[in-house]
Amino acid sequence: MCGVFFFLLVFPWFGLDIGGTLVKLVYFEPKDITAEEEEEEVENLKSIRKYLTSNVAYGSTGIRDVHLELKDLTLCGRKGNLHFIRFPTHDMPAFIQMGSEKHFSSLHTTLCATGGGAYKFEQDFRTVGDLQLCKLDELDCLIKGVLYIDSVGFNGDSECYYFENPTDSEKCQKLPFNLENPYPLLLVNIGSGVSILAVYSKDNYKRVTGTSFGNMMSKEKRESVSKEDLARATLITITNNIGSIARMCALNENINRVVFVGNFLRINTISMRLLAYALDYWSKGQLKALFLEHEGYFGAVGAFLELLNSA
């Protein structure tokens, strides 16, 4: 598995998804460290753990999504919490430099990563950070991450949800949905681009289609409206287009369960409610739009799980 072989799976445990716009990082913080382990723990590892878990912001752009933290997980016999961190992809060189300054390579020399940036920044990881990247298939990681997070749940609550009465601001409700026995499902990943996957089992899936974001309207029309109006109109156009395509794919694949994920949906209730309405409308009530709390982090979770599976 990409040369990731350890006599013991040493900390820290990371998974990276390096997308076109955002880098998503998951970090497992062990909570069951014994006194003996802590005494033997090298200062570099203590420094990394303290830096990642004591802050909610890193520099001017890095964010730890504290509200998404998964607590009391057991992985490879260790108990701990899973943290979710994101920062813009254009800050990736600064992240690699930080890893070099904190001597990350002295702890272990391979990171599991997915996304197009795993190829783009591979040489920088090697030359600047003295780190080897294990590059993983983006769609494999996405599906593994979705299935794992849904299986463990969200700290006792449901990971999956839907909107009832999505177009009525007063009656709209966010309600939990049980994704037990999920197959088949249509998985729509909306990030810098859109990938639509038909998933028949954890090992049997295919990419049905994909799309990029709509073109901006003419210069004359742009100048006649406010930026806010333009942004909302573009958002509605993109969302309705995605909903229509998802409905057609679901019909063609004979799938009635459609799950939307990706960072496009982060703090984007407008698009989620529009997707819920569009899918219901175009399918005449036969399809329900489902969403997941951890939105764009599933690729990073899948990369993280591959690290554990490779030990």
Image: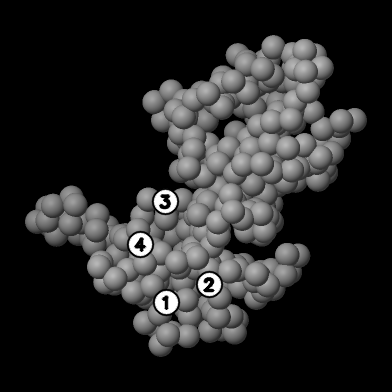
The three-letter code of the residue at mark 3 reads Arg
**Which badge, 2 or 3, is on the more N-terminal residue?**
2
Tag 1 or tag 3, which sits nearer the N-term?
3
Q: Are marks 1 and 2 in contact (CB under 8 Å)?
A: yes
Residue nearest the observer in this picture, 271 or 205: 271
Residue positioned 62% across, 58% down in the render: 150
Amino acid type of the residue that numbered disc 1 sits on in the rendered structure: Leu
Residue 279's disc is: 1
Q: Which residue is mark 4?
A: 271
- The three-letter code of the residue at mark 4 reads Ser
Q: Nearer the viewer, residue 124 or 182?
A: 182
Q: Earlier in the sequence, mark 4 or mark 1?
A: 4
* Nearer the observer, 19 or 266: 266
> What percent of the width, then of the height, locates residue 257?
56, 75
Left or right: residue 270 versus residue 67 is left
Tell me the residue at 35%/62% (across/down).
271
Q: CA distance from mark 4 to mark 3?
A: 10 Å
- Residue neighbourhood size for the residue with mark 2, other residues' Cα within 10 Å, grouped as few (<14), some (14–19), many (≥20): many
In the picture of the structure, the residue carrying the numbered disc 2 is 258
* Element marked by disc 3: loop
Q: Quadrant of residue 230?
A: bottom left
Earlier in the chain: of badge 4 and badge 3, it is 3
1 or 2: tag closer to the N-terminus: 2
The quadrant of the picture occupied by the C terminus is: top right
> Tag 1, which secondary structure?
helix
Instruction: Identify residue type, mark 2.
Output: Val
Q: Are marks 4 and 1 in contact (CB under 8 Å)?
A: no
**Residue furthest left as drawn:** 224
User: Residue 266, labelled with which disc?
Assistant: 3
Q: Residues within 10 Å of mark 3 (few under 14, many from 20)?
A: some
